Image (tube, rainbow, N blue to C red):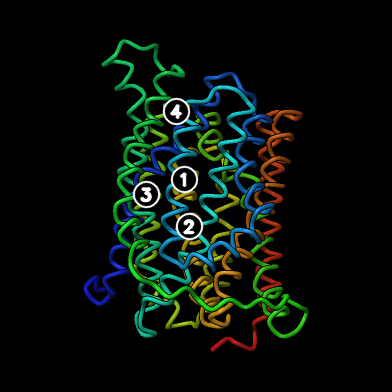
Amino acid sequence: MLRFREFTPPARLYLLAVFVSSLAGSIFHLALNFYLETLKFDRRDIGIINAAAPGALVVAGLLIGRVSDRLGRGRGLLLGATLGLTAILGLSLSSTMTWLVAFAACRGIAEAMVGANSAPFMAEHSAPEHRVHLFAFQAAVMTATGLFGNVVGGHLPDWYSAWWGLAPKSPEAFRVTLLTGAGIYSLSLVPFAIIGLRRETPPSRDTERLETGPVGRLFFKLLLPHAIVGLGAGMTMPFLNLYVQGKFHIDVEHVGYLFGFSSVLTAAGMLVQPWVAHRFGKVAAIQLTQAVSIPFLLVLGFCPVFWLVAVAMLIRNMLMNMASPIYSAFSMEIVPRERRATFSVAAMMAWNSGWAISTAVSGVLQRQLGPETGFNIAFGAMAGLYVTSIVVFHFFFQRKRR
């Protein structure tokens, strides 16, 4: 059973920061695509803007890894959070393609800085017997906050329109919603600052190039299936709110409810995740949760009945998100300590390179073929890529199964 008091004080501060930043992020992410639509951007342009963040991460990933090693985990988290707030404010206040892409890229760098330091920070501030629990708790906090954030985020545009006499679903209403997310996000800088100002010994720096020796082969085996999953996810996930709203013609606030309930169910899955990892072993647990999610993905993409699509979305999101913290904990255990920050950046680069490519491709498909045909191709490709990732991961790590 997960017990909060078992975690170290730095880990508890980190979880508080994650709670606040995730709450803000759920409001922001729900509203951003709708904001872009009110500015009259088409699906191709929205795809390009969404692809800018992972694209920037891929370009700047190695530099981010070096900076993280020099700063230490705490200062890296604080710098990443500060850049994240700058990016959210910039996206909220921008309305031209150039500035939106620029701040989206800044957001990608910020998320890379936070992500590069998060897994090593948790691994280095947790006892071995609590490590999987801490990773699971962090993932549960991130997803559970989505309930309140998505539900409130779905209502905020209408509330602001009514309070201030704005046109319903206007750019101004969505802009204020985005700024609300930015205001909440700014509060996370307090625990991040406390973490960053603590005296901390930076992790040892390994200046040798990563060759194709044992560590290089280990990185390749861990990163290839991860990149394939990212390539599949980018085909549909950045557009999922637009897909549900457009296919079934439901209101934005109802989309918020659906995504909120998805976060609750995903958080529940996170809480049983340590048991799944213990019962089946980490490698088998990753494969099992991903494989079981595929039938629900196909229902989500091709079923014409809303309630079945909603149920499939809830279960699919829960299963796929259960695999992620197990993968992170598994990676941190088998990657040498001095390589953990490097690996964390490399994992984000692998994921986001796939995500950026497929997001841009999916946006073009929707523009050229129409949303319905575009999404049909996207969901089919996503399912095929997920199957490929499971097969590759099994081939690489079947000997590590319990």
Q: Amino acid at mark 3?
A: Ser
| Residue 37 seen anywhere in this rendered image of the structure | yes
Q: Are marks 3 and 1 in contact (CB under 8 Å)?
A: yes
Q: Residue at x 28, y 74 (%)?
A: 7
Whether residue 250 sits left or right of residue 217 in the image: it is left
Q: Which residue is mark 4?
A: 250
The image quadrant that residue 388 belongs to is bottom right
Indicate the secondary structure of the residue bearing disc 3: helix
Q: CA distance from mark 2 to mark 4?
A: 35 Å
Which numbered circle lies on residue 114?
Answer: 2
Q: Residues within 10 Å of mark 4 (few under 14, many from 20)?
A: few
Quadrant where the image shows the N terminus: bottom left
**Decide: marks 2, 1 in contact (CB < 8 A)?**
yes
Residue highlighted by disc 3: 21
Q: Position of residue 106 (x, y in %)?
A: 56, 43
Q: Which amino acid is tagged 1?
A: Gly
What residue is disc 1 on?
84
Q: Label 2: how many residues lie within 10 Å, few (<14), some (14-19) or many (20+)? A: many
Query: Which residue appears at 36% of the width and 78% of the height?
Result: 126
- The amino acid at mark 2 is Val
Whichever of labels 2 and 1 marks the residue nearer the N terminus, that label is 1
Query: Where 133 sits versus 111, above or below?
Result: below
Question: What amino acid type is highlighted by mark number 4?
Answer: Ile
Disc with the residue nearer the chain's start (2 vs 3): 3
